[in-house]
Amino acid sequence: MKKSDFDAGEVQGLLASGYAKHTAACFVLLRILNGQAAREWLGRIAAQITYCGNRQAVSKLNIAFSYAALGKLGCSPEELDGFSREFCEGMVTPHRQRILGDLPGGPNDPETWQWGGPRNPPIDVLLMVYELTPAALQTRLDGIRSGAEGVEIIQEHRSTGLQNNREHFGFRDGIAQPTIEGIGKPGPARDRVARGEFILGHPDETGSLELAPAMALNGSYVVLRQILQDVPGFWESLGQDSPVAERIALAAKIVGRWPDGTPLTLSPEPPVAANPTNDFAFHAKDREGLRCPFGAHIRRANPRDTLLDHPAASMEMINRHRLLRRGRSFGLPAPPSTYPEGLAVKAMEGVMGSTDLRGLFFICLNASLARQFEFVQQNWVNLPKFDDLTHDTDPLVGATPWAGPGQSPEFMIQGCPVSKRVSRPQTYVHTIGGAYFFLPGKKTLQRLAGT
Amino acid sequence: MRKGEPRTGDLFSDSQWRQPETITVFADLPDNAADGVRNLLAGATDSLGLDQLPGVHFFRAFVIASGVDAAGAFPTRAVISAVFDGETDEFFSQWCAAAHDRIVEIFHPCADFPSTATSENVCQWLQARAERPKTYHIGPVRSRASEVREEARLRSALGDFIAAQNTAGAWQHGDLLRIWDDIRAFVRSRVDLPQTPRVPNDWFARVLQTLDLVKRVGLLLLVPGVLAWLWLSRTRHSLWSYPLAVLGFLAAMFSAWAILVRIYELAEPDVVVKPAPGQVAAAVVDEDKGFQNQFTMLTPVRDSFFRRLNLRFVLWLADGLSRHFWNGGQLAGIETIHFARFHQIDGGRRMFFMSDFDGSWERYLFDFVEIGSLAVVPIWTNLRGCPKTRFLRWTTPGFEQRFLPFTRAYQIRTHFWYSAMSTLTVSEINRNADIRAGLFQKKGRRAIQQWLQLI
């Protein structure tokens, strides 16, 4: 693919925004039944897609396709040649299961998934629908259902807007995000990354273009994983009989932030006022992990300036492995009694739910699934030997691919005079669905729709 | 050799001061026997007797297919490569004693294999085909397998002890000196844990190491030194003239070399190499099953005498750097490599690379490009299909995107791979060694605190 000038209007809006104000959202998973009819359906949908800079649109709609879908919509093998191996093969292969911790017989085994697994119907199209109110979402979904020709809706998953940007465990989420050069407001300098890290056809941090076919221009790869969160299990494992402050402090060590989002690195004691910032690094203030442990979730997912000996070199390296996260919660919050006092999570007003299952739709965008999402999962989140640790995985979301019989994962909390080792359950989260998609740019979407 | 140990092997060999040792055996194999050997190696469910050799770190065995280039044909070969403590002849004789029947079963079709195989003549047959690498990088430097095991046990026991003390609330006083005394008393009470620090190399080994460095610097300066001498011998000169002239000639030679490199870089065709369909899928079948992975690659060198010579020189340079500078657990910043070996085979027309490393193949290759490019790129750029560079060192846009498929394309399957300590990473091994070393040093409070952070 040749280097191209950038027009933000060619890029789907999800790259610029997670549509936080649009608290009513639904992820619609579809299968293509008839290529020609599906193209006509796509022609109608394509006109409604939200692109960057389209602030007027009240409703937001984005669309992404599986590799198989692109073939079903008429793309020739020559046109598709150059898409990454990870995207072409999909999320469920024996090797990829080892990378992502989705091991056979384990808690994330794709055999048990509710969608995207080998026992489930194929998912060709992902429609991401965002509205300001549940009523508007209902109306929009009715329209999508009635207009679906050539495609079959396999599943619809409503997202639940949670108050104060919290996720189900009770912590403020979505704080640490890279900002893309030329899109949106620039964040802290260390979080600014080149467009090509997320948008195909543009130079990345090294000035290179990720290998991709011409049709991938202005597109991005989407990772979607539906993750169940065991909220009672999480808080119970932190010691029900312990004082509230101790439980919260331990949970904060696991996450790396206080529930209000304040980083432990900036505030090792409970903060007086919330400071949910992403503008901090570890090297200067917390090289020994005495504030935010080496194994804490935020330190594994984004090790910032401490993975290499030199902080600047570490940041440079880390920025080659960033993820643009666009996740959403699903399911109603756990009962208030589940949480320590004052931490109960509440749903946005008007949100309805019918299931006790709750969790997160993990959604991230990247230009290289191997270098970004899979790398982070395998080498930082799931690796027990991360950064001088030996037996930990990510204490919040890490799979435990190498924990054998009788071996329980640990969480090491660096401390003075000695570090403390905390045993924890195998996992608090279970993946129950997942797939890789391609989020096309405007011209490619029009080409797919034949418009 | 360590202090107080009896000296064995060649008195002046590198193995006297640089351990673990490594050796690779290349044995010609008739084409019609290749599949049989491959299947035996790939299907082996035992350790080929290696678990009876306590000094072995890593071992691999595989078959490389015959091939041809413009200069001639390459035979099919059975290849064995091992990393072990001690001397090569000791390793071969111990292995032959432990697994004689398996060695004969697998390798008897190889050319000139003894028709009546005894441990002795099989050992000689292996020795006769053994080569040391042109470049050898050691991650856990001077770590014997026995020490690695002892120190892993020590760290684990200390971790359990500290956890138990925490649970019992025994150290709530927070007095570092008392904690330090408790820990040392605990170690003394456990006879299965190391009771002394590692024994350092003896004076002779240190002399050999220094001589090796002097020899390499001397070889680098030999030609400019002679030229400077010839030039200055015709004129009167001051004391400083000779070193300045040597540096001047060295700079001139370096510049000429750099210009020649650049000319070749510009003139050579840009060959794009991609893995064949299904090749990557076949390769990953064996990957990411534990903490460690391995990689074997056989690549044609760019087709010119200059490139073959250049690769030989760069490998020699890299070997010197690995011996004397990149010997603290990192290769130019990469800290996941246990052992890496480079051979130039078939008259220098092909480069053969083997590595045992921590983490995924992707991480390993990204580390090559992102962190350790100084050590890696100047070697790889001499290979056919490697994306182009500038002056060997600087990559061009798109390098990474082409480098990974290029390495996959020339990756060959390692049919049998054995890791003696498969759950330990290089950083862990080196950290465990630091824990042991610190345990036997006199310390103040600050040093005790720093040491405790290691556990």
Image: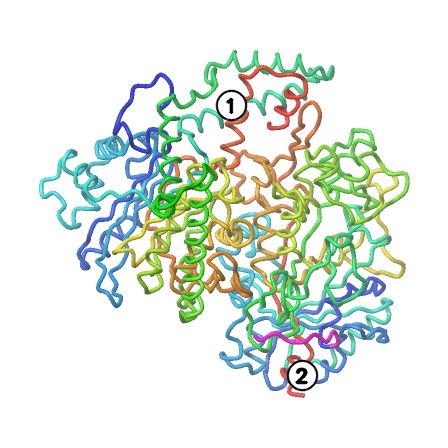
* Furthest residue in direction bottom, as rendered: A451
The residue lying toward the viewer, choosing from B170 and A115, is: B170
Residue A295 % position (x, y)? 65, 39
The residue lying toward the viewer, choosing from A348 and B254, is: B254
Asked if residue B403 can be seen in this view, the reply is: yes
Residue B433's place in the image compared with B414, above or below, is: above
The numbered mark at residue B154 is 1
The numbered mark at residue A72 is none
Q: Is the magenta stretch mostly helix, strand or loop?
A: loop
Q: How many marks?
A: 2
Chain letter for mark 2:
A
For the record, the magenta segment spans A1-9
Chain letter for mark 1:
B
Residue beneath label 2, please?
A: A446
Q: Name the residue rendered at 75%, 76% in the picture.
A: A9
Looking at the picture, which amino acid does disc 1 mark? Leu
Residue B105 % position (x, y)? 19, 44
The residue lying toward the viewer, choosing from A239 and A417, is: A417
Residue A25's place in the image compared with A383, above or below, is: below
The residue lying toward the viewer, choosing from B19 and B161, is: B19
